[in-house]
Image: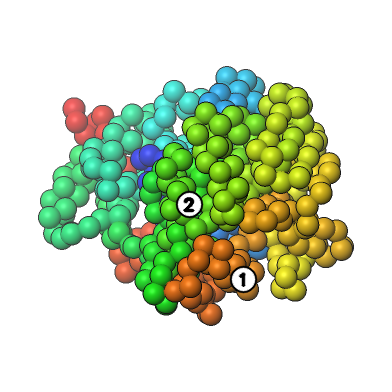
Amino acid sequence: MRGALLVAGTTSDAGKSVLVAGLCRMLARRGVRVAPFKAQNMSNNSVVTLDGGEIGRAQALQARACGLEPSVRFNPVLLKPGGDRTSQLVVRGRAVTTVGARDYITHREWLREIVTAELAALRDEFDVVICEGAGSPAEINLRATDLANMGLAQAAQLPVLVVGDIDRGGVLAHLFGTVAVLSPADQALIAGFVINKFRGDVGLLEPGLDQLRALTGRPTLGVVPFAEGLWLDAEDSLGVVGDAPVGRPTPPIGEEWLRVAAIRLPRVSNSTDVEALACEPGVSVHWVTEPSRLADADLVVLPGSKSTVTDLDWLRRSGIGDALIRRAQAGGAILGICGGYQMLGRVIDDDVESGAGSVQGLDLLDLEIEFGSDKVLAQVDGDAWGIPVRGYEIHHGRVRRTGDAPLLTDAAGTKEGSVRGSVRGTHWHGLLENDDFRRRLLTEVAETAGRAGFVVAPDTDVARVREAQLDLLADLVERHLDVDAVLAIVGGGSPVGLPTIASRLL
């Protein structure tokens, strides 16, 4: 078979990313050469690809679902929000400028050429391309300049499935309304609906689905149940909620739990770094937004930030900065990653990201950071505690000087990261996904915290957990979607003869 499909959503975090990943893994298991594609993403959760750029983390997961290495081809335009009104524009994996909401419009035409050319090339190379929309196609105020939803669907004549999250309530209205506000030409490309995160008796929902079909002329091609086991590689910031647990904590092997507090910065980036910790039995990871939540934590993780100086100021204003200083003085374990690592140092000189110049850090590490205009993008290998480790770097800040012991040594023999007492830091993302390194770190944290009853699991394999989640997604697609109907839509191109909602109502 050959063809393509666009999966759109009624809202952000409706389930587009996971449905695309599930469809990709399902097709790959059937021997279909399939690739993912997201023309434009907006996310601060990104990864570095083998071709030396960065893409949204969801597209990296979708590539793995296809059995492919992540590539900038799968996400040619990435917006990384650094404030309420500005974002860094990343094109084909490289940061090119910072744009505001209004001036981004001026870039749309040349970006449109890039995304349509990239999609065409992928369709020539692969049997099937499963595209993911961005936000909602019902944002009609943005339709004239849309690159990722109906604009892409029209340019490439893609059939569109619209997915809605029933957990939010009002899903039938969301699905109906999404189609109703579109122009007749755009409505003609909507081939059907999928409902996500359903709990309960589907028989109670079926009359509503029948009415939805009567109103729109379009079928609901699947009702996917809520699955507890799906949480790794969360991309949308809506999933990073203060005081909420990360993942689904499983009981400890020993007699005690280990408690991890991950600080939910306003501009948190690569929040997925802490997910590997949450894969461990007996490790409870929570996002926190106020200082009292640090008091009983055995480890505090200060993650990356897309706006390091601004988030450092938030740490101070929230009281968390002082709580971190008291914690370090008391010998409590702290781990800073990328921007979080930079905040732990003495000085940050930033004339690039914030333009703030020289700013005092928390002074918990003997570290000076200077921002450069070019972003460091690299996949990296090295050694920590005699353990081989891998990771990736995405940052503007460089270490100008450090007086602390290194956390690790990279493959070239260069010292990386810092250790000062119970405070550690590194620029490397993905470090906690190295199973042996994570076990050693948790062992040391438990000893520091006096958790003699905590036992590190000897066999947690994050890569295997991720693969199991992809297979679970594919299983859900196989069981709960009308796969034959979906494949017919993929192979048949844009739908023909579907009525507009306006004509149905008159």
Q: Is mark 1 on a helix, strand or loop?
A: helix
Residue 174 in which image quadrant: top left
The residue that disc 2 covers is: 261
State how the image is colored. Answer: rainbow
Marks 2 and 1: CB-CB under 8 Å? no
Inspect the image, locate mark 1, and give the three-letter code of the amino acid beneath it: Arg
Q: In which quarter of the image is the C terminus?
A: top left
Inspect the image, locate mark 2, and give the three-letter code of the amino acid beneath it: Ala
Q: Which percent across, then down, holds residue 26? A: 45, 68
Residue at x-position 67% and y-position 44%: 364
Residue at x-position 38% and y-position 39%: 11
Is 48 or 245 nearer to us in this picture? 245
Is 29 or 196 nearer to us in this picture? 196
- Please report whichever mark, 2 or 1, sits nearer to the chain's N-terminal start: 2
Q: Which percent across, then down, holds residue 457? A: 50, 77
Residue at x-position 38% and y-position 62%: 248
Is 305 or 66 nearer to us in this picture? 305
The reply, left or right, for residue 52 in relation to residue 212 is right
